[in-house]
């Protein structure tokens, strides 16, 4: 009887209904499902009447009444269960821009809170319409700052954008592409970071359909082809799991349902990981809604006993919430029939927050008195971005930072994040790939400037150590420590970079005062050394102009000699960076070209695949063997020998797809007394978003850890904006290979990295 409450045919539990509505009754029907106050419902209806009256003479580009747009915007907000003032602001969000109504008139009729919301949305919208590319930085700054002050602004913009994308076919194709690209890069990224999954997935699929309709329809057809079979499999699995948990284990669950993958998420997995549709393992997915946290872990244990869990596929986002908001247990299982399926286990509250994220904090509560500042603070305690955005804006105005706010926000805020703990268990968010030094500067500038290392889970490690989620980090400092140009190679975040640059610039200015009594020759030599150091640290040696051109540039700037120019730098007329850019280097050559040239012209050591004492054959050393070029095994990996005709013994990795056990295979092992003295060649395959300076970024991180690169090859797909590449490197053992793989994963544009073996 208990089974009857669950619908085994259910394929999804919650989803935004992205349609255009054309009358208030459709909106009111949704509002009445959660707003109980008649006064609030009347206020919303008054706002609709006001909006309809003032937009009455206006039409959309397809000739339909303009009121359909704000009405549909409010409809999506109602599905997110937003409060009356947010719904009213959604109905009125275009009224200041498109009608004679003023902010003061709105405040008088609907209150200051509504007027402020509408005004904030209007300011963001203004920059979205004219000179989009030229004003992009200012437009994004407006979005981020308005969101940091009141997150409802971006939530209203999400609803506005959903309807605009829904009805975008009325615009010229080129404008559709611009808007869809902006939606995918900015709006869906923000929705993901603040945890509003329903909005994120809807914006992704709708934008992708515009940007790449051929790929969209291809994947759509692939999904539809076997959808009935997958639905039937899911139905059987849900029934089996439900009976098992309720009847056999006595665990009551609230709900169980299937979870379909979106078109865009399938596309990303296929193209980023180079997989065929048939190879995707998580098209079958089930979500279980448990009564409480304890039941989540109990259910996980029971399912791991009943089915076969796949190694490396378990994630505990309850203990360490993703993006500070999302909580769930994820695992991938296989049943006896060979079906591989993903299971997500979470409570009802976790599921609500997973779908609506930060918007859940603004969900309607009857009789609640709203304190906007308090609400924002509560949300920021979870997602950790609002205060930092406001601080960044204030700092950038004071510091004349040479990095754009757009770039800093994209790299430090709206990217893949890790969550690290202080000793008192405070959660600190950092971009993936951040180091101990980034963490120190995130705590406080003074802590960063004097950091010498950190205790990570009780073990002392240096400042260049890359951090992982869940680690407890305690920074160690020394009053004698101070930033150097070398630190710019270690850090990953824009915040730390700007703090270090500011310190180094101030040190030069202080040096100007102290050096007044120094001889000019000493000053000139110091500046010259600073310039040389800057050029070396920024890997600009191959861009450096020859002495004749440098002198010509100096004279064009009005200085009689190079020494006079050095003294001008010393006086602060130019920073070292400005001087290098203006006079000493030619930036016309791209970073990727320089990186490739450096690798192609570097001295390559002869690669020898023949070894004797490194590998024992049946326990015997001093036998000549050859490393197989298909898999290129490295020390510490299990290996096997193969007696080949005319080529002696070839050594393969045991996991090599070319290994076939026969009478010609022979036992081999690494000689621990010898292999640590040599280096071994291996291959790495990576997939990335096609972005400028990809090769340079790869070269930079590998150079920082002293990895030896033999060759690099990169192929790009301009239509799909994707890149794939192969690296051939030299390593001593699997530990060094793991370090290299971690370093490559820290490159922001790289999506996946893996060891390559040729089948």
Image: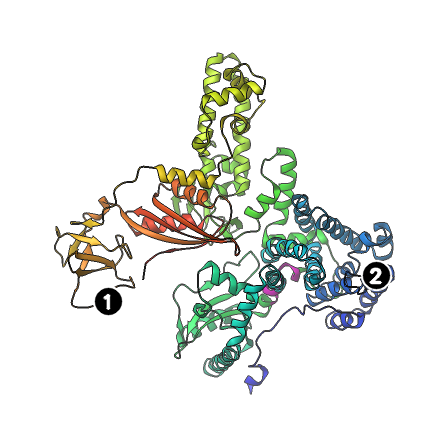
Q: 691 or 671: nearer the eye?
A: 691
Image location (x, y in percent) of residue 66: 80, 62
Q: Is residue 278 above or below residue 620?
A: below
Marked residue nearer the N-terminal end (1 or 2):
2
Q: In this figure, which residue is indicated by the disc labeled 2? A: 51
Q: Quadrant of the C terminus?
A: bottom left
Quadrant holding the N terminus: bottom right
**How packed is label 2: few (under 14 Cα within 10 Å), some, or many (20 or more)?**
many
Q: Mark 1–mark 2 contact, CB under 8 Å? A: no
Whether residue 570 can be seen here? no
Q: In the current view of this chain or complex, which residue is farthest to the bottom? A: 1
10 Å neighbourhood of mark 1: few (<14), some, or many (≥20)? few
* Residue for point 38% across, 65% down: 311
Residue 735's place in the image compared with 354, above or below, is: above
**Is residue 515 positioned above or below 319 on the image?**
above
Left or right of 378, for residue 451:
left
Q: Residue at x 72, y 61 (%)?
A: 170
Q: Position of residue 543 (x, y in %)?
A: 46, 32
Q: Position of residue 754 (x, y in %)?
A: 38, 56
Residue 470: horizontal and vertical position, in percent?
A: 46, 54
Q: Secondary structure at mark 2?
A: helix
- Who's the residue at 55% across and 36% down the image? 498
Q: Is residue 65 highlighted in magenta?
A: no
Nearer to the camera, 739 or 479: 739
Residue stretch rendered in magenta on the structure: 352-360
Q: Quadrant of residue 657?
A: bottom left
Q: Is residue 545 left or right of residue 289?
A: left
723 or 418: nearer the eye? 723
State the predominant SS element of the stretch in magenta: helix
Task: Give the residue at mark 1.
Answer: 660
Q: How is the image coloured?
A: rainbow
As helix, strand or loop, the secondary structure at mark 1 comes to loop
């Amino acid at each position: 009887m208990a089974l009857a409450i669950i619908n085994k045919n259910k394929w999804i539990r919650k989803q935004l209904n992205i349609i255009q509505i054309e009358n208030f009754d459709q909106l009111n029907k949704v509002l009445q499902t959660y707003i109980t106050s008649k006064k609030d419902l009347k206020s919303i209806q008054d706002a609709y009447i006001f909006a309809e009256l003032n937009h009455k003479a206006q039409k959309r580009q397809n000739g339909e009444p303009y009121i359909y747009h704000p009405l549909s915007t409010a409809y999506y907000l109602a599905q997110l269960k937003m409060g009356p003032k947010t719904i009213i602001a959604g109905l009125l969000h275009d009224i200041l821009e498109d009608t004679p109504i003023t902010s003061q008139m709105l405040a008088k009729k609907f209150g200051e809170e509504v007027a402020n919301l509408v005004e904030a949305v209007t300011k963001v919208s203004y920059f979205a319409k004219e000179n989009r590319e030229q004003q992009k930085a200012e437009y994004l700054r407006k979005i981020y700052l308005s969101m940091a002050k009141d997150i409802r602004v971006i939530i209203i913009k999400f609803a506005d954008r959903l309807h605009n994308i829904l009805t975008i076919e009325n615009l010229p194709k080129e404008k559709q592409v611009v808007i869809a690209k902006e939606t995918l890069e900015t709006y869906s990224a923000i929705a993901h970071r603040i945890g509003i999954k329903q909005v994120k997935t809807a914006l992704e699929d709708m934008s992708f359909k515009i940007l790449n309709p051929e790929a969209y329809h291809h994947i759509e057809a692939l999904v539809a082809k076997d959808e009935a079979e997958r639905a039937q499999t899911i139905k059987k699995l849900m029934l089996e799991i439900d009976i098992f948990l309720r009847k056999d284990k006595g665990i009551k669950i609230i709900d169980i349902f299937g979870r379909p993958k979106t078109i865009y998420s399938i596309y990303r997995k296929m193209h980023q990981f180079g997989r065929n549709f048939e190879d995707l393992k998580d098209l079958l997915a089930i979500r279980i809604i448990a009564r409480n946290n304890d039941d989540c872990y109990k259910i996980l244990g029971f399912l791991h006993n009943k089915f076969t869990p796949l190694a490396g596929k378990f994630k505990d986002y309850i203990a360490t919430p993703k993006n500070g908001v999302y909580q769930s247990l994820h695992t991938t299982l296989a049943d006896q029939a060979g079906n591989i399926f993903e299971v997500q286990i979470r409570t009802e509250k976790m599921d609500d927050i997973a779908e609506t994220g930060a918007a859940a904090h603004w969900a309607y509560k009857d009789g609640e008195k709203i304190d906007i500042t308090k609400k924002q603070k509560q949300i920021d305690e979870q997602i950790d971005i609002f205060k930092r955005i406001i601080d960044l804006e204030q700092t950038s105005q004071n510091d004349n930072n040479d990095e754009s706010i757009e770039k800093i926000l994209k790299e430090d805020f709206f990217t893949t994040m890790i969550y690290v703990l202080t000793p008192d268990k405070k959660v600190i968010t950092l971009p993936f790939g951040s180091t101990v030094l980034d963490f120190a500067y995130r705590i406080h500038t003074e802590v960063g400037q004097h950091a010498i290392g950190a205790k990570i889970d009780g073990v002392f490690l240096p400042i260049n150590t890359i951090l992982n989620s869940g680690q407890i980090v305690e920074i160690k400092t020394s009053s004698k420590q101070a930033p150097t140009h070398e630190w710019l190679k270690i850090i990953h975040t824009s915040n730390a970079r700007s703090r270090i640059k500011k310190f180094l610039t101030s040190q030069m200015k202080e040096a100007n005062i102290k050096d007044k009594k120094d001889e000019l020759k000493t000053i000139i030599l110091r500046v010259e050394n600073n310039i040389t150091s800057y050029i070396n640290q920024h890997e600009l040696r191959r861009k450096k102009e020859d002495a004749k051109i440098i002198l010509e540039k100096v004279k064009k700037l009005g200085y009689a000699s190079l020494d006079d120019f050095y003294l001008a730098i010393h006086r602060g007329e130019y920073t070292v960076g400005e001087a290098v850019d203006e006079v000493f280097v030619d930036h016309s050559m791209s970073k990727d070209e320089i990186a490739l040239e450096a690798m192609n012209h570097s001295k390559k050591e002869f690669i020898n695949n023949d070894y004797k004492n490194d590998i024992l054959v049946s326990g015997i050393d001093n036998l000549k063997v050859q490393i197989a070029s298909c898999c290129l095994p490295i020390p510490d990996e299990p290996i096997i020998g193969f007696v080949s005709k005319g080529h002696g013994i070839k050594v393969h990795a045991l996991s090599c797809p070319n290994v076939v056990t026969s009478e010609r295979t022979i036992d081999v092992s690494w000689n621990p007394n010898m292999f640590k003295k040599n280096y071994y060649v291996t291959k790495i395959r990576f997939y990335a978003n096609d972005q400028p300076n990809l090769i340079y970024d790869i070269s930079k991180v590998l150079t920082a850890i002293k990895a030896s690169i033999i060759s690099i090859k990169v192929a790009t797909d301009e239509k799909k904006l994707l890149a794939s590449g192969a690296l051939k490197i030299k390593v001593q053992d699997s530990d060094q290979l793991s370090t290299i793989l971690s370093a490559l994963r820290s490159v922001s544009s790289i999506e996946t990295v893996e060891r390559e073996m040729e089948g």
